[in-house]
Image (cartoon, rainbow, N blue to C red):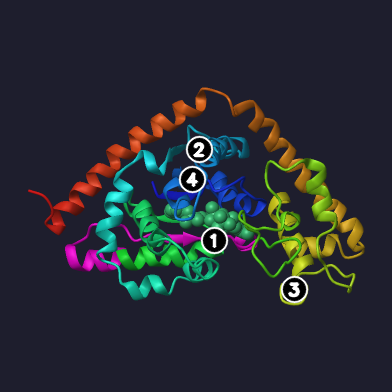
Amino acid sequence: MKKVLTGLQPTGVITLGNYIGAIKQMIKYQNEYESYLFIADMHAITINQDKNELRKNIKSLLALYLACGIDPNKNIIYIQSDNEYHTNLSWILECNTYFGELSRMTQFKDKSSKNENFSAGLFTYPVLMAADILLYDIDYVPVGLDQKQHVELARDIAIRFNKKYGDIFKVPEPLLTKEGTKIMDLVDPTKKMSKSSINQKGVIRLLDNIDDIKKKILSATTDSDNKIYYDMENKPGISNLLNIYSVIKEIPVKELENKFKDYNYKDFKEEVADAVADLISNIQEKYYRLINSDILNEILDKGMDITRKQAKIKYEKVKEVVGLGR
Ligand code: ATP
Ligand code: LTN
């Protein structure tokens, strides 16, 4: 069976963008592929984290995975830092990655330009991501558009390593959905909706108050044309709302253009707001039932055991071909 893997960082409450770009895809794939879903806490500390917040976010992210519809019987779910082979392999891969390659990563350029004192971890972050993937012979990696370049780097690293040391790693492929590729900020629809965004009004988080969520959608930036059709370049606000509605309702954008052709913006936004509110209140109801339950630790223990065993085999193989140890 083909294998699929993705991870999200526990850097705050996840957004509608994360849900659509990563989690929703995994919900679909869990029925078709052997699925791995993890909490990328080692990636989270590439930028400064408050330790209590981080710990809280890790558990909260797990409960959100489940509340969104991730089935623990169909996914191997684990915390990245519970499995030391990720960072072990990452070091070996770093020694097979060029400084120039990492310098070209747009996320690094973006994030490092915002802060003078960025960590070395922020720079090597994509290599750890490659290790996350290459440890398990993964076929597909569902991500949003912002992570595509990192998955491509993982491919390059795998191909280069295989050339040098033999056929060790499976070469993974990124999986992107058309509509969900990039959900934009509601206030500035030319910018990605991001967990770490400062302006709260543009970002919908899965644990936001439902009335606030509706308000955010009703006041989303649009244009003065008052016609509803998809044109990301000239009508980014409306196109973004069409994308969101399309993914939630599973109706192609083309059909929606027809459905909404006689709507004004206010009525259209109300329909989008209701769809998002329905989805998220459902998730929240499940989340609050799960957050203090013992089942969370059981799931993580199981995921840790399974992935450690699998990762150890791959890591030992890598050590051997590289000539490390005895
Ligand atoms: P941060 O703001 O801390 O960088 P983020 O919101 O970008 O966080 P990540 O944890 O980096 O979230 O990403 C988790 C997953 O969600 C990744 O697969 C990423 O591609 C996807 N994703 C993030 N933002 C969006 C978005 N706006 N639209 C679609 N997918 C997204
Ligand atoms: N860098 C990713 C999270 C992440 C990931 C991965 C995604 C870490 N390792 C491996 C897919 C595969 C992010 O910030 N979204």
Q: Mark 1: which secondary structure?
A: loop
Q: In percent of the image, x 73 and y 50: which residue is there? A: 249
Q: Quadrant of residue 192?
A: bottom right
Reading the image, the residue beneath label 4 is 32
Viewer-side label of 3, 4: 3
Along the line of sight, which residue is nearer the eye, 91 or 275? 91
Along the line of sight, which residue is nearer the eye, 51 or 167? 51
Viewer-side label of 2, 3: 2
Q: Is residue 63 magenta?
A: no
Of the residues under marks 2 and 3, which one precedes in the sequence? Answer: 2
Q: In percent of the image, x 81 and y 60: which residue is there? A: 220
Residues at marks 2 and 3, CA–CA distance in whole angstroms: 41 Å
- Residue extending furthest toward the front: 117
Type of the residue with mark 4? Glu
Q: Mark 2: which secondary structure?
A: helix
Reading the image, the residue beneath label 1 is 176
Type of the residue with mark 3? Asp
